[in-house]
Amino acid sequence: MAEPAVVNDYLKSENIDIRPLSGALGAEVRGVDIANLDNDGFAAIHSLLMEYSVLAIHDNPGLTDSQLRDWGLRWGSLDVHGYSPTVKGYDDVLNISSGPKRRASAEGWHSDVSWKEIPPKISMLHARKLPSVGGDTIYCSQYKAYEDLSENMKDFLEPLHAQHDGRNFDIDLIRKPVTHPIVITHPETGRKALYVNRGFTRRIPEFPPMESTAILNFLYDHCTRERYQARIRYESGTLSMWDNRCVQHCAVPDYGYEVRELHRVAVLCDERPSQ
């Protein structure tokens, strides 16, 4: 990561405005042109993401799908989801949209594609069309959720693993679960985070089903408490970015049949999540 002093000097010199979204995580950022960011600018955004875990980078309405992909590729290889609708011409840019013929219905806490052996480390959503009100995304810090556990609970959870699968997208994926640690160590910050989510985590193989379900239900409720949350309210051209290694998120389908369209890229982890 870039030196804090270098990052601070860059942010001041470019008049970049940063405002925290909550006491738990997240920040709004203004004054950044994603498509024309130099290496110092990239280092500054990287540093901010490691600090806040979630960024809402406003005022980028002209960002094209090609530029969105290029921005993602600066962070690493892109995930090909394989099961969700994509933008025409790109197999690694998802089109997350709803409108008059398809009301938004998906909601629920999750970490993107945790059912793959190499899941995404960073996800990005670019706001293209927005409803008159609503359509926000809520985020939850898994650093904070882990840190608030008792020492006895931390000791209990750290040796354990959980199976994840993508049956929500294709029932065949029920036969292809992957296993990740329940507590992972972030490879860049060194901080520990919980890594289970109600959307894709199915069981703890070290325990019989009833005990596994009881432990997971406790974790699902604990790791999405309001005290760990922040909300992004999109504007036209907002680019949201978040770190799946330490964040869960949830879409809010509160806008009926109005049009909402966001384009998404996800950057793969360099290796499997680990303790």
Image (spheres, rainbow, N blue to C red):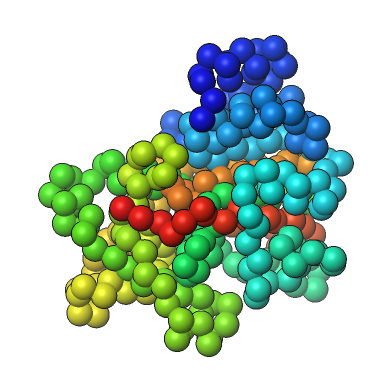
Residue 10 visible? The answer is yes
The correct choice, above or below, for 7 with respect to 139 in the image is: above
The correct choice, above or below, for 116 with respect to 186 in the image is: below
- At a point 21% along the width and 59% down the height, the residue shown is 159
The correct choice, above or below, for 145 with respect to 254 in the image is: above
Residue 177 location, x and y as percent? 42, 77
Residue 90 location, x and y as percent? 79, 64
In terms of image quadrants, where is residue 27? top right
Report the side of 242 relative to 61 (left or right): left
Residue toward you, 180 or 258: 180
Residue 258 visible? The answer is no
Report the side of 15 relative to 117 (left or right): right
State how many labels appear. Answer: 0
- At a point 36% along the width and 55% down the height, the residue shown is 274
Residue 157 location, x and y as percent? 22, 57
- At a point 74% along the width and 56% down the height, the residue shown is 263
- At a point 35% along the width and 40% down the height, the residue shown is 191
In terms of image quadrants, where is residue 84? bottom right
In terms of image quadrants, where is residue 183? bottom left
The correct choice, above or below, for 166 with respect to 104 in the image is: below
Residue 119 location, x and y as percent? 51, 61
